[in-house]
Amino acid sequence: MTAIASAAPITAAAHRPGKKTNVALWTVQILLGLFLIIASAAPKLLGAHAAVESFDTIGWGQWFRYFTGVVELAGGIGLLVPRLNGPAAVGLTITMVCAALTQVFLLGAPALAPFPLVLGVVFVWIAWQRRDSITAVRDLLAR
C-alpha cells in the first residue's frame, strides 16, 4: 500500500456497525424512540398536569414545554428512521445534557439529573455508531 492510498479518506461503509451491534442499536433505538414519543413528548404536548407544573417551575413559559415536546417527538421519530438516526442521536444528546442542567439548576432536583445524563451517553453511542447517517445528512445539506 502506498502512502497516498493509506491516507485516503475512510468511506462511509467503514463506519457501519457489525451485525450484532446493529441489532443492539436497533433494539435500543426502537425502545428509546417509543419512550421519547409516548412517555416523554406526549405528556408535554398533551398538557399533562405534571408537565405543566414542571415547566411553570422552570419559569420560561408553556411555549418551552411545547418546544421541548416537539424536540423529543422529532428525536424519537428520528431514531426510528435510518437516514436520521445519527443526527437525531446528536440532537437528543444535547437535549439530555440540557435536561440534566435544568434538573440541577432550575428545578432544584440534582438527584434526577443522572437519568438524562445516562440517556445522553446512550445517545452518544448511537450517534457514534450511526455516524455514516450524520455524514450523509451533512453532505445532503451541503448541496
Image (cartoon, rainbow, N blue to C red):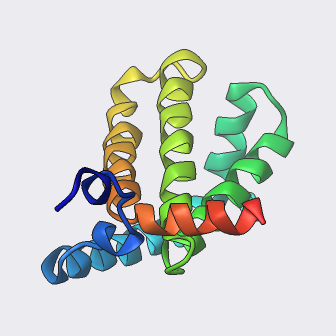
Compared with residue 104, is residue 45 higher up or lower down, i.e. above or below?
below
Q: Residue furthest front?
A: 2
Compared with residue 61, is residue 81 higher up or lower down, i.e. above or below?
below
Q: Quadrant of the N terminus?
A: bottom left
Query: Residue at 47% across / 71% down in the picture?
Result: 33
Compared with residue 21, is residue 91 higher up or lower down, i.e. above or below?
above
The answer to whether one can see residue 127 in this image is yes
Of 101 and 55, the residue lying toward us = 101
Residue 35, image x, y percentages? 45, 68
Of 48 and 34, the residue lying toward us = 34
Query: Residue at 62% across / 66% down in the picture?
Result: 137
Query: Residue at 24% across / 50% down in the picture?
Result: 3
Classify residue 56 as left or right of residue 88: right
Residue 79, image x, y percentages? 49, 71
Of 127 and 55, the residue lying toward us = 127
Residue 116, image x, y percentages? 41, 41
Classify residue 130 as left or right of residue 94: left
